[in-house]
Amino acid sequence: MKIESVKNFFKILRKWWLPLAVVLFFIYLMFFDKNNIRVRMEYKNELDSLKEILDTYLKQMKEDSIKIEELTRDKDAVEEYAREEYGYKKADEDVFIIKTTTEE
């Protein structure tokens, strides 16, 4: 009886060896290869976060290029920017900076 079951197993194996090999190969690729599903998901998450950062930088570049364009065209805008960002003042004027704190 053992010999017949072994013969039947080899008959089935001879008939289905290729689909079985393909399935085992895909299981190996999905779970045991160095680029398995977990690693691919980590790469996808990292790529998504880098795309978000790229969008942020592109938006900032657009805003900065608009500001540079404005500063190259208008001399009053340069003076206003210098006063706001760097605290510049004219020689004959006094500037008082008042900082307020918000309490929560």
Image: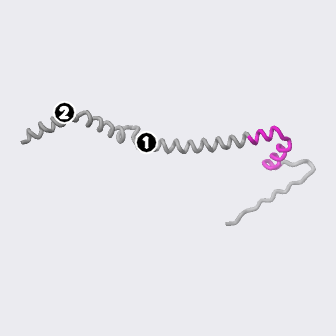
Looking at the rendered structure, the secondary structure element under dot 1 is: helix
Residue 61 location in percent, x, y? 68, 40
Report whether 72 appears left or right of 40: right
Report whether 17 appears left or right of 64: left
Mark 1 is on which residue type? Val
Q: Point out the stretch of residues depicted in magenta.
A: 66-87
Residue 103 location in percent, x, y? 70, 66
**Which residue occupies 11% across, 36% down?**
7
Residue 50 location in percent, x, y? 56, 42
Q: Does the magenta stretch include residue 72?
A: yes
**Which residue occupies 65% across, 41% down?**
58
Q: In which quarter of the image is the N terminus?
A: top left
Q: Which of 57 and 7 is in front in this view?
A: 7
Query: Which residue is label 2 attached to?
Result: 14
The number of numbered discs placed on residues in the rendered structure image is: 2
Report whether 67 appears left or right of 11: right
Among all residues in the image, which is located at the extreme left?
1
Disc 1: CA contacts within 10 A as few (<14), some (14-19) or many (>=20): few
Q: In which quarter of the image is the C terminus?
A: bottom right
Look at the magenta stretch and give its main secondary structure: helix
Image quadrant assignment for residue 21: top left
Pick whichever of labels 1 and 2 is earlier in the sequence.
Answer: 2
Q: Which of 102 and 10 is in front in this view?
A: 10
**Which residue occupies 51% across, 43% down?**
46
Q: Which of 38 and 66 is in front in this view?
A: 66
Query: Which residue is label 1 attached to?
Result: 39
Mark 2 is on which residue type? Arg
**Which residue occupies 76% across, 42% down?**
67
